[in-house]
Each structure stands twice: as structure tokens, then as C-alpha cells.
Image (tube, helix red, strand yellow):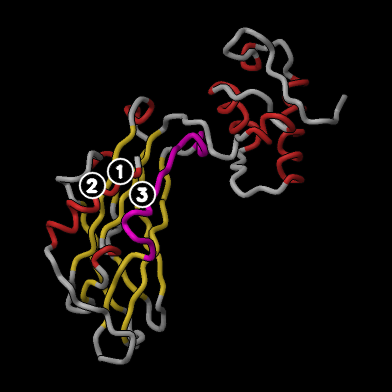
Amino acid sequence: MKNKILIILALALLSIGCDKREIPTYNTGRHYIEFENATVDSTIFTFIYHPYDEYYDLPVAVKIAGQDADRDLTYKIYVDEELSTAETKHYTLPEKTVIRQGFYHDTCYIRLNKTSDLDSKKVRLVIRLETTSDLAIGKLENSVAIIQFSNTVDRPEWWDSNVEQYYLGTYSQKKFVLFLQVTEADLTGASDSEKRAYALEFKQYLIDHRGEPETIDENGQPMTVPVLGLE
């Protein structure tokens, strides 16, 4: 995945050209726009964490360099269709994008639509900044944003050996999806007490719905979790 992102970045920068300019940080009377994150920091999103939403407004952070804005500054984003696999049905770009007066940092929102084909595939959306009369493009490595999204399930990094041993037990896709539906919890960066609280909430649900088809795991056995409590 990392190599694929680097290839996309190389293609994106190659199409811009070998511009070696440096962005001044002092007062030049000009403004420069760039994404907060470099292109290699690809955004990965799944609707699995939002099972009841038909769309999600994904925040994309931008920033300016140079003189601070003494008025609203308009910037533009557009889709690189050659590098994107997402179709127009998968997303909606904002009609207007503005750095507000007095701000160095701001946010635009790209609407990602949960279409039925995302249940079986991931798509890639490559967004570029475009120069306007208000704003020139800043650092080239921050001029392209890559968003990968789907409604598919991958084992999350937070479901590690610690979570498996003390909180949620053996991972399965069915258990993960049910855990999300019950708790709506993303345990990325969660403390041990937070993990335990969500695991107990899930355990209570399994107790209350014992024997029902949704709590029978993929191996044909009832779902269980090792978190202590509620015995």
C-alpha cells in the first residue's frame, strides 16, 4: 500500500513539473495554499465505522503560508481523474472553498457517498489544489491529497494481541462488524479503561442476545469476549 501511494505521488508531482521554488514565511504580500498533510499521508476511510450513514463529510485540512489573510481567500480543488478510481457517484466536492479572514488553517469537506459497489471494492480519490487569483500553490508535496475509501472490512490495527487477549478475544469479520454496530467505537488510541468499557458493553449485548443468529460467530460457535466482569 505504501509503495502504491509513493508511485501515485511520483506521478502527481511529475505532471506538475520540477518546480524548485521555496515558500517564504515572511510578509511578501502573497499567499500560498497547501494541504496540511503531505501526499504520502494518504487518508483511508471505511463506512464500516458509520453503518447507518449514507454519506460522510470528510474533513480535509488546508493551510496558507506567507502573509496572514486580511480578507477571505478563495482557493480551488479538483479531481485528478487520471489517477483516481472513484467515479462521480462516489463523491461530491464543495461548491466553494475559502480560507477565512484571519486564519492560517482551515478545513474543507468532501462528501463521500456510500454506494453499493463499495461493499466489495475500495476506490481512490486524488484531489489537487489549483492556483487562483487569491492563492498560489505552496509546497508541491502538499498540493495533492489521496483519499481511499470503501465499505469493506479490514482487521483494524487496534485489534492487536492485547485487545485479543484481554478484551475482545479472537478476531472475526462478523464479530468486528457487530462490535461496531453495538458500540460505534473506534478503539484507535483508546486507554485500557476505555477498551474495557466498550468490551463490557459488547459483552452485555452478547449475553442479552445469546443464541441469536447475529451472535453466532463465523465458526458456528457463540461469540465470546475475555474481558472480566458481568459474570
Relative to 58, say whether 195 is above or below. Answer: above
Quarter of the image for the C terminus: give it.
top right
* Residues drawn in magenta: 36-52
- Residue count near mark 1 (Cα–Cα under 10 Å), binned few <14, some 14–19, many ≥20: few
Relative to 112, say whether 131 is above or below. Answer: below
Q: Secondary structure at mark 1?
A: helix
Q: Are marks 1 and 2 in contact (CB under 8 Å)?
A: yes
User: What residue is disc 3 on?
Assistant: 111
Q: Are marks 2 and 3 in contact (CB under 8 Å)?
A: no
Give the residue drawn at x 23%, y 47%.
7
Q: Secondary structure at mark 3?
A: strand
Furthest-right residue in this view = 231
Disc 3 to disc 1, how far (Cα)?
Answer: 27 Å
**Residue nearest the viewer, comparing 70 with 122:** 122
User: What residue is disc 1 on?
Assistant: 3
Give the residue drawn at x 49%, y 34%.
48
User: In the rendering, at what x and y percent does residue 187 appear?
Assistant: 62, 43
- The three-letter code of the residue at mark 2 reads Ile
Nearer to us of marks 2 and 3 is 2
First in residue order: circle 3 vs circle 1: 1
User: In the rendering, at what x and y percent does residue 135 appear?
Assistant: 23, 76
Q: Secondary structure at mark 2?
A: helix
Give the quadrant of residue 116. Answer: top left
- The three-letter code of the residue at mark 1 reads Asn
- In the rendered picture of this protein, how many numbered marks are placed on residues? 3
- The three-letter code of the residue at mark 3 reads Arg
User: In the rendering, at what x and y percent does residue 75 appear?
Assistant: 25, 70
User: In the rendering, at what x and y percent does residue 46 appear?
Assistant: 44, 38
Horizontal arrangement in the rendering, residue 191 relative to residue 104 (left or right)? right
Give the residue drawn at x 78%, y 30%.
227
Nearer to us of marks 3 and 1 is 1
Which mark is on residue 7?
2
